[in-house]
Image (spheres, rainbow, N blue to C red):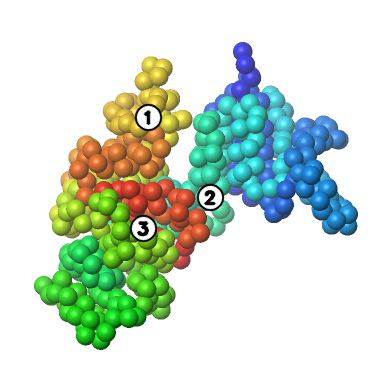
Amino acid sequence: MAIRTILIPLDESEYSRQIVRVVRAFISPDDVEIVLFRAADDRSPSPSLTFSEGSSTANVRDGSYEANNRTPDAERSAANQQRVAARERIEAELAEEVGRLNSAGYSARAEVSFGEPAQRIIDYVNNHHVDLVAMTTHGRRGLDKLVLGSVTERVQRGVSVPVLLMRSEAAGDGNKDPDPMFSTIVGNSSHLRIAAATDCSMLSLRAVSQAAELASALHATMELLVVAGEQDSAEKAQSLMDTAMEQVAGLECQPLATPLVGYADEAVLQHLADHPVDLLVIGAFQDRGAASTSAIGPTAQRLVQYAPCSVLVYKGHRSHFRRILVCLSVDDADRVDAAARSARTLGAEISVLHVIPQSAASYLSDEKGEASGGTSAIALSQVISQGTPLSAMLQGWIARLDEHGVGPDAVLLAKGSLPEAILRTAQDGAHDLIVLGSHAPPARFPSSVANEIVRYAEQSVLLLRNASA
């Protein structure tokens, strides 16, 4: 029987090692080789070092020989000394874990690599025989699991083998709620602060109307940000303000109207930095430019990327939110409650979607090949009947929804990549609002799952973002 190789990437944190216990609990030592992988980011090209328990030497595979030869002797010597010291330290750290695995009957060794961690992991998997990558995600909870940490997300995208993920929390963070905006926007919204930004283009005006409806339904305060260009006359600016105010004429509590001058994204972001809100509502601005009905244009895209708050991107297809698709991950029982309350407040139907990665979905059926390939729905009854932790999670969601008068049909399962599964489910179910989370910082947002949904969804998208992220 062929030896199965499991790669376990670790970092300096103790809780990254929790995945080792998971692997030992679920995978027997027979015909398994475990590779503990540590990538140290030294911001420079580097060799990869291999060692095994009981060995006093290391095999060096130098992928940066030419680069090192271009380095002045003194700098090269100092860098090599730093590498040697780092290697010795990491070897000592990993040797104990390797020893425990060997004592438990596993064939275990360690790999140490210097360079950008995600890329080093991807390179190792793609250049060696690896059957499974098992790694820990650091303390992320709630909707933000859809947009994983940069290393985890890049590894998932960059390798073609299954990736087993375990969520872990750093010590002392157990009571921290990283999604306060979810509870505010999609749950108890009595103190919700909404800002709607417009340059009076058609879709941005429709977004203002949508913001007014939300403010009325959720008893929120609202601010109207009206942007005029630097070259616009005072008469033009006043006309824009009058046009925008017509969209909120029916509100019982009239919003604060704030004129802004300049490029829309720069002016709005500067205002939000000085006057924080919980939710920014926008549509496509005048620079939309594309013929696609779902395109929002670069101005709206930059606002989504850099806004310090949650953002509702109104796509303009429906005037009311009647079917809401809430995308959740594990440990989201409280979010199910909040979403159900919000849907009831808005008079909308709710669907709760959980996406199962292709690698995990392949184990959900007794018939080989039944769950492989493409993006598709998975029968809820099929998963619940298997008695797995996933089954227990889904049963908990169903019980929570039942307390709010929502039937089990509201829970949807899909397999495949996150963006494709979410977009397909929203389209097939005729949903008019997709709710998902993001903790990706602005620099990494363009490569995130959330950005793909915002860009390509035909429906409006509510992107929940922690104000402190």
Location of residue 388 with respect to 90 vertically, above or below: above
| Mark 3 or mark 2: whose residue is earlier in sequence | 2
Q: Residue at x 36, y 77 (%)?
A: 262
Q: Residue 137's x, y, as percent?
A: 53, 46
Measured in 3D between alpha carbons, the distance from the residue under mark 3 to the one under mark 2, in whole angstroms, is 18 Å
User: The disc labelled 3 sits on which kind of residue?
Assistant: Leu
Nearest to the observer: residue 215 or residue 113: 113
Q: Which residue is mark 1?
A: 374
Residue 136 horizontal side relative to residue 178, left or right: right
**Helix, strand or loop at disc 2?**
helix
Q: Residue 445's x, y, as percent?
A: 46, 55
Q: Residue 280's x, y, as percent?
A: 31, 66
State yes or no: discs 3 and 1 in contact (Cβ < 8 Å).
no
| Mark 1 or mark 2: whose residue is earlier in sequence | 2
Q: Which residue is mark 2?
A: 150
Q: Residue at x 69, y 54 (%)?
A: 43
State yes or no: discs 3 and 2 in contact (Cβ < 8 Å).
no
- Mark 3 Cα within 10 Å, few/some/many (few <14, many 20+)? many
Residue 464 - label: 3
User: The disc labelled 1 sits on which kind of residue?
Assistant: Gly
- Mark 1 Cα within 10 Å, few/some/many (few <14, many 20+)? few
Q: Residue at x 47, y 61 (%)?
A: 442
Q: Residue 201's x, y, as percent?
A: 23, 67
Quadrant of residue 129 within the rendered picture: top right
Specify the quadrant that holds the N terminus. top right
| Mark 3 or mark 1: whose residue is earlier in sequence | 1
Residue 163 horizontal side relative to residue 183, left or right: right
Residue found at the far top of this picture: 1
